[in-house]
Image: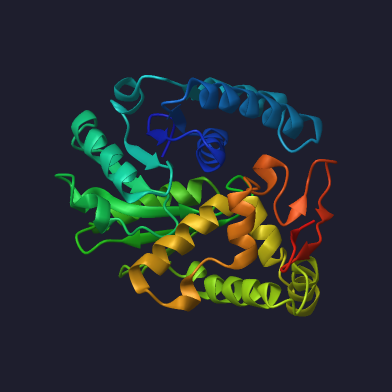
């Protein structure tokens, strides 16, 4: 694949801006779009700052950075952004109705050849393919946070995803220097999250019981099990609002009390403390470095 293969990314949030820039760095012509001009401006600035930092640290040459900039486009008009794409990666909010609306619009605006992939971390693509006329060209393409660093991409096929679609998405991942894994059947939560969710739920349960602090639980998993990041650090990075949303939806479907969002998580989301993006979550980031916060389940957070 070369620069003639065009990728569009819908959604300029935390994931979208990193996925799009990663693709541009690795040789793809990329257009990112979002309904928010503020988000698009933040994406432009992020790309500028990131590439400058890579050059300063010697990770990219100035020529490589300039080439990435030339391939990277920010386009506020939805139809223009996706109108000639070979692959669209949707990275909007994790709400089924919102994603379905995006896929309906994509199906109308994109050429027949265009593959439509969702970066959703838990919504399977058959839930989105059903509103298109191209279910064979729809799949999950789930990147991990931070998308510019993390290597794994989960490719999840729906029952109608074609082998050609699978092969194309697999090749895109490889060119982006990612490690793709293919799920031949859909399962909510995919591979990693099905395992990780059990760890996260147990970590939240232990913290809610007052067995240990979130920070000490993080330390235990990092230094006892070799995890690169503890569950509370991970939740702060991906966003507590997202964790709460995913957990709430799972509880709504299952009715199982163990799937209910935890006490501390609910409290933080209620307070608007969503993690790194708001400056406070299970840790306080306002000083630039994460600082442990103290919690009292009887009196509330301190």
Q: Is residue 121 visible?
A: yes
In this image, 281 relative to 113: left or right?
Answer: right
Q: Looking at the image, is 231 positioned above or below residue 269?
A: below
Q: How is colour applied across the structure in the image?
A: rainbow
Specify whether residue 145 is in view.
no
Looking at this view, name the residue that lies furthest to the front. 299
Q: From the viewer's perspective, is residue 33 above or below residue 198?
A: above
In the depicted structure, whether residue 219 falls above or below residue 154: below
Image quadrant assignment for residue 46: top right
Task: Establish if 123 lies above or below 260.
Answer: above
Number of numbered discs present? 0
> Residue at 45% across / 30% down in the picture?
30
Residue at image coords 53%, 27%: 39
Which quadrant of the rendered structure holds the C terminus? Answer: bottom right
Residue 284 appears at what percent x and percent y? 78, 49
Residue sitting at x 75%, y 73%: 217
The residue closer to the viewer here, 79 or 71, is 79
* Residue shown at the point (81%, 51%) measured from the top left: 290
Quadrant, the N terminus: top left
Expressed as whole percent of the image width and height from the top left, the position of residue 102 reads 30, 38
Left or right of 210? Residue 186 is: left
Pinpoint residue 232: horizontal percent, then vertical percent.
68, 62
């Amino acid at each position: 694949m070369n620069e003639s293969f065009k990728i569009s990314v819908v959604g300029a949030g935390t994931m979208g801006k990193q996925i799009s820039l990663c693709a541009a760095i690795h040789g793809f012509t990329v257009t990112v779009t979002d309904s928010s001009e503020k988000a698009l401006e933040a994406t432009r600035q992020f790309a500028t700052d990131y590439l400058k930092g890579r050059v300063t640290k010697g990770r990219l040459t100035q020529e490589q950075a300039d080439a990435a900039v030339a391939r990277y486009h920010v386009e506020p008009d939805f139809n223009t952004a996706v109108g000639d794409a070979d692959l669209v990666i949707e990275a909007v909010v994790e709400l089924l109705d919102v994603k379905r609306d995006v896929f309906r619009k994509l199906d109308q605006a994109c050429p027949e050849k265009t593959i439509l992939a969702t970066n959703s971390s838990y919504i399977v693509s058959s839930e989105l393919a059903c509103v298109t006329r191209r279910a064979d060209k729809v799949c999950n393409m789930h990147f991990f946070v931070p998308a510019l660093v993390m290597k794994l991409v989960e490719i999840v096929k729906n029952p109608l995803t074609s082998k050609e679609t699978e092969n194309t998405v697999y090749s895109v991942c490889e060119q982006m220097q990612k490690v793709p894994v293919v799920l031949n059947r859909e399962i909510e939560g995919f591979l990693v999250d099905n395992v990780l969710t059990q760890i996260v739920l147990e970590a939240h349960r232990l913290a809610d019981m007052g067995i240990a602090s979130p920070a000490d639980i993080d330390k235990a998993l990092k230094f006892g099990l070799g995890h690169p990041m503890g569950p509370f650090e991970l939740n702060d990075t991906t966003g507590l609002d997202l964790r709460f949303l995913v957990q709430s939806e799972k509880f709504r479907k299952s009715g199982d009390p163990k799937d209910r969002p935890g006490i501390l998580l609910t409290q933080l989301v209620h307070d608007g403390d969503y993690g790194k993006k708001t400056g406070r979550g299970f840790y306080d980031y306002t000083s630039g470095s994460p600082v442990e916060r103290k919690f009292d389940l009887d009196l509330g957070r301190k």
